[in-house]
Image (cartoon, coloured by chain):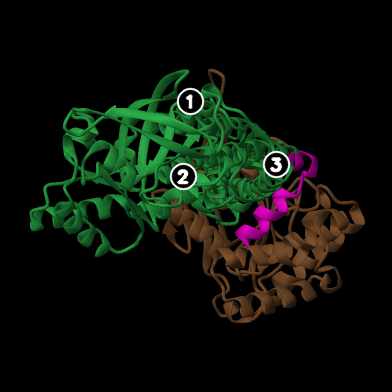
């Protein structure tokens, strides 16, 4: 993937949340889903945000992924504030610098595995030859070379999530945000996926932020944030930063 | 890949797509057939009128406009000669002939009846009558005392080819004149009323009977009827420049009823087109709205991956257009097939007031294929705009939350 060069800046802040707050209106009631959250994801980090259902994990991830706007506070991407950016600029950041992995894989059903992986490169207007080469390489890396032509409905849950991971990484993003990536997988497949993410993080220095309520995911993190009732309740560092 | 995705999405729910395609195809088949029928009806009327009247007529403006009788505005030979020279210089002229129309009586010792006669140059225009000859032969000698009668008139008089009848009329100077002529043939005309009064005589004989050396009007045929307005204007200019005191009228100016008929048929076509458009629009709108709604989550996904609203919008609209294009091709193809099949049946009918069966044909061409195809594209495009716009306007989070 040619991203090893990013590691020379390991530790540089990629994604930061400052006093991030999000309200939802339910009928006449205003619900605080996220309450003044501060968070920094640095280059090469593998962070797990852990918490029970309804704790605000997905809300935080949506805000960090720039697919939702905060009620208050700020998300900084590579040190630059994003709250005043128009939707067009946010879409640009998402396609160029953010990779997303969804709980339910969210593959486009009419496209093959390879085409699903190729899709983000079409959005970045990557030349055809380069697209094909990158898709081939990333599918090999996630172990799906032989299944490239299969449609999502012809793949197992684990294979689909591998396609989703390949799709998230194919644009060589600065950060990959994963929302409950193991929630729809059996434990053995979930373990394989987490090992894949961990390997990609270690090999390519890609920054990962994974939100989950699955305790089996926690051991893969260097850093674990616990979120409860919309607030970061604690932070645990489980490993030393690895040398670039 | 936008088109690839659109194409695959069109095929995603085959049953639904098939129903949409059938609705479009049936609507377009009907439209294509109706446009072909109407087009042919207008063209057949046009052909028939131009065959009889010429593409242009030249004569005294008062006569051409019906403000004076033919005998009041005859074209003298020297003026005719100059006019014909200018007509021959006109590009695209395929035929020219002179005529005199006059009214009189035709009959024998037993009785007489009204005659609406035309003095014609046999070699110029008897071909058109020869093809509908009911009996006998066409006129031949340009000055002979011969007449071809409408078949109904001949039957009323109880005469047939070879019999002799008397023709009486007023001369150009207003005196009475009469002659005995030989019936050489009878003709059938589409218009039964005209057939009850028509008599064709050689122009030379008509001039002798009317005691004139002039003609009433000159008929001009062109190789391209669409050039009639330009040719009429050019001829009027050259007459004016040369001091020829004649007017020029196009065939459609001489038949104001034609524009009413054509307007009626075009309004009928327009109404059918609108009805098919509305049918296709609402059918496709319903199908696309459901299809797009089912894919709201996919919209959320591609937007989250960085696709712009415009890209999402274009993707959905492409899908609608693709459906329209497929349905359009199917509809146009079946419309052509139906028209060809219909023409192969060789059906005909006798129009009200008519005398002869007229073939019912349906034309097939760009005019019957293009508009229906555009209706399919237009209706599906319009039908896709609302659901596509609605999906594209959703926020990413809203779209991702959809079930």
x then y, percent, for residue A114: 74, 67
| Quarter occupied by the N terminus of chain B | bottom right
Which of marks 3 and 1 precedes in the sequence?
1
Q: Colour of chain B?
A: green
- Nearer the observer, disc 1 or disc 3? 1
User: Mark 2 falls on what kind of element?
Assistant: helix
Write the residue at 11% across / 47% down. Answer: B245
Which mark, by number, is residue B47? Answer: 2
Are the residues under badges 2 and 1 in a single subunit? yes
User: Mark 3 falls on what kind of element?
Assistant: loop
Q: Is residue B215 visible?
A: yes
Highlighted range, magenta: B1-18
Q: Quadrant of residue A176?
A: bottom right
The relative height of residue B119 versus residue A7 in the rendered view (above or below) is above
Give the spatial CA distance, label 2 vs label 3. Answer: 19 Å
User: Residue beneath label 1, please?
Assistant: B196
Which of marks 3 and 2 precedes in the sequence?
2
| Quarter occupied by the C terminus of chain B | top right
Q: Is residue B128 left or right of residue A220?
A: left
Q: Residues within 10 Å of mark 1 (few under 14, many from 20)?
A: many
Give the spatial CA distance, label 1 vs label 3. Answer: 28 Å
Frontmost residue, B200 versus A34: B200
User: Residue beneath label 3, please?
Assistant: B346
Write the residue at 7% across / 54% down. Answer: B243
The relative height of residue A244 versus residue B36 in the rendered view (above or below) is below
x then y, percent, for residue B369: 57, 49
Overall secondary structure of the magenta section? helix
Which of marks 1 and 2 precedes in the sequence?
2
């Amino acid at each position: 993937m040619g991203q090893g060069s990013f590691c020379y800046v390991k530790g540089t802040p990629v994604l930061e949340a400052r006093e991030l707050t999000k309200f939802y209106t339910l009928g006449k009631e205003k619900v605080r889903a996220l309450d003044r959250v501060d968070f920094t994801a640095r280059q090469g980090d593998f962070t797990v945000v852990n918490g029970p259902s309804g704790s605000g994990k997905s809300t935080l991830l949506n805000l960090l992924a720039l697919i939702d706007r905060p009620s208050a506070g700020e998300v900084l991407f590579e040190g630059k504030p994003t709250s005043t950016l128009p939707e067009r600029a946010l879409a640009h950041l998402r396609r160029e610098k953010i990779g997303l992995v969804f709980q339910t894989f969210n593959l486009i059903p009419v496209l093959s595995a390879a085409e699903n992986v190729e899709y983000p490169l079409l959005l970045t207007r990557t030349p055809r030859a380069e697209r094909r080469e990158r898709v081939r390489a990333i599918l090999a890396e996630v172990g799906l070379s032989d299944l490239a032509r299969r449609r999502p409905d012809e793949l197992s849950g684990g294979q689909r999530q591998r396609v989703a991971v390949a799709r998230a990484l194919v644009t060589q993003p600065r950060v990959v945000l994963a929302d409950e990536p193991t929630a729809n997988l059996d434990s053995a497949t979930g373990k394989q996926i987490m090992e894949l993410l961990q390997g990609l993080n270690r090999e390519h220095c890609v920054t990962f932020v994974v939100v989950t309520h699955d305790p089996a995911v926690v051991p893969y993190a260097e850093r674990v944030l616990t979120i409860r009732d919309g607030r970061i309740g604690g932070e645990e560092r489980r490993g030393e930063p690895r040398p670039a | 890949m936008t088109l690839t995705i659109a194409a695959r999405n069109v095929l995603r729910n085959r049953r639904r797509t098939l129903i949409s395609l059938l609705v479009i195809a049936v609507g377009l088949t009907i439209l294509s057939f109706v446009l072909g029928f109407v087009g042919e009806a207008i063209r057949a009327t046009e052909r028939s009128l131009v065959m009889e009247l010429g593409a242009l007529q030249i004569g005294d403006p008062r006569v051409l406009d019906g403000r004076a009788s033919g005998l009041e505005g005859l074209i003298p030979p020297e003026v005719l000669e100059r006019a014909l020279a200018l007509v021959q210089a006109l590009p695209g002229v395929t035929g020219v002939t002179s005529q005199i129309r006059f009214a009189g009586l035709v009959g024998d010792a037993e009785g007489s009846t009204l005659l609406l006669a035309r003095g014609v140059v046999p070699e110029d225009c008897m071909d058109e009558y020869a093809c509908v000859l009911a009996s006998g032969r066409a006129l031949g000698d340009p000055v002979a005392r011969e007449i071809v009668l409408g078949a109904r008139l001949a039957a009323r008089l109880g005469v047939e080819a070879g019999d002799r009848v008397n023709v009486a009329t007023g001369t150009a100077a207003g005196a009475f004149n009469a002659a005995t002529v030989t019936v050489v043939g009878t003709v059938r005309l589409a218009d039964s009323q005209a057939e009850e009064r028509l008599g064709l005589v050689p122009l030379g004989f008509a001039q002798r009977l009317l005691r004139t050396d002039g003609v009433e009007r000159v008929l001009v045929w062109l190789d391209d009827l669409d050039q009639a307005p330009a040719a009429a204007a050019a001829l009027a200019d050259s007459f004016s420049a040369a001091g020829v005191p004649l007017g020029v009228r196009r065939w459609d100016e001489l038949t104001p009823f034609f524009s009413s008929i054509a307007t009626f048929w075009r309004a009928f076509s327009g109404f059918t087109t609108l009805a098919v458009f509305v049918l296709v629009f609402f059918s496709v709108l319903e199908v696309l709205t459901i299809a797009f709604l089912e894919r709201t989550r996919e919209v959320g996904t591609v937007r989250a991956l960085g696709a712009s609203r415009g890209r999402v919008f274009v993707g959905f609209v492409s899908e609608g257009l693709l459906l329209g294009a497929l349905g359009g091709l199917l509809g146009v193809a079946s419309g052509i097939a139906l028209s060809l099949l219909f023409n192969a049946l060789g059906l005909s009918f006798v129009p009200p007031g008519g005398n002869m069966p007229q073939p019912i044909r349906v034309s097939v061409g760009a005019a019957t294929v293009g508009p229906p195809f555009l209706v399919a594209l237009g209706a599906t495009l319009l039908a896709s705009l609302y659901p596509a716009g609605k999906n594209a306007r959703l926020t990413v989070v809203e779209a991702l939350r959809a079930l």
